Amino acid sequence: MAEPDELPDAALLRYSRHLLLDDIGVEGQRRMLQSRVLIIGAGGLGSPAAMYLASAGVGSITLVDDDTVDLTNLQRQIIHSTASLGQAKVLSAQKTLHELNPTVQVQALQMRADTPLLQSLVAQADVVLDCCDNFQTRQAINAACVQQRVPLVSGAAIGMDGQIAVYDPRDPTAPCYACVFAPHPPPEEARCATMGVLAPLVGVIGAMQALEALKLLARTGTSLSGFLLMLDARHMEWTRLRVHQNPACAVCGPKH
């Protein structure tokens, strides 16, 4: 590991506002630069999350999404532009992140996040961000994170309601996503394409996902592990709920 004073001059300047923080400093920034983050979904939540992680200096970001940029996406998916219409979202996002911070390595995978792929990708990550809008995929991401013992930062937004949580399987007492949202029976899917979503809401939740991920990577502060934070944007009211591990959870319970 490099000594603290071995950060390149360009990095010292680029990340100077982090270096001034007692909670981050040179050591925290160095951890970010050496870290690997996996982001599932390059849409409304993944856009701000990926941009803040790249600008903050996360060393390696892997983006997974099988979709292409559509005109309806541009109302909220700020990592894409009108010039990106028809392009793979991961390639459009990769270009934006490279322009934002060319020192960050960005791997773009245009594919669906299925279980075999997730096991391999999660095993290589330090933190995983669930920025998808599919319940089945969310459960698969969670299962892979539990198996590989990699912390998961989960976000969701629909209409004018958002939520964020951290599930950290490194803590044997912490709940996983399946403890809070049981896999069976699956809920009726609510998606932006049918329900709508207020544009800045996904920005708020996605940015908070990046914040929680950076805290985990820099090993600073207290994460949201064990809590579910919900936002009613209509009235700008936050609700923080304590969530507990389910001893009978089929994913992280004692027998699994």
Image (cartoon, grey):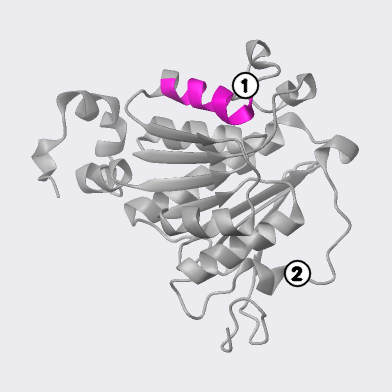
**Mainly helix, strand or loop, the magenta region?**
helix
Residue 222 left/right relative to 7: right
Mark 1 and mark 2: Cα distance apart in space: 32 Å
Identified at 70% across, 24% down, the residue is 69
x and y percentages locating residue 107 in the rendered image:
45, 35
- Residue position for label 1: 80
* Secondary-structure class at tag 1: loop
Spot occupied by residue 97 in the image (x, y as percentages of width and height): 46, 25
Q: Is residue 107 left or right of residue 255?
A: left
Amino acid type of the residue tagged 1 in the rendering: His
Q: Disc 2 marks which residue?
A: 183
Is residue 32 in view? yes
- Asked which secondary structure carries label 2, the reply is loop
Which label belongs to residue 180? none
Tell me which corner region of the image, top left, top right, bottom left or bottom right, holds residue 254: bottom right
Identify the residue at image location x=70%, y=33%: 67
Q: Amino acid at mark 2?
A: Pro
Q: Is residue 239 visible?
A: no
Which residue sits at x=48%, y=51%? 212
Q: Position of residue 45 (x, y in %)?
A: 64, 39
Q: Residue furthest front?
A: 116
The magenta stretch spans residue 246: no
Q: Are marks 1 and 2 in contact (CB under 8 Å)?
A: no
Q: Which residues are magenta?
A: 88-98
Q: Nearer the viewer, residue 237 or 14?
A: 14
N-terminal-most mark, 1 or 2: 1
The residue depicted at 48 percent of the width and 61 percent of the height is 151
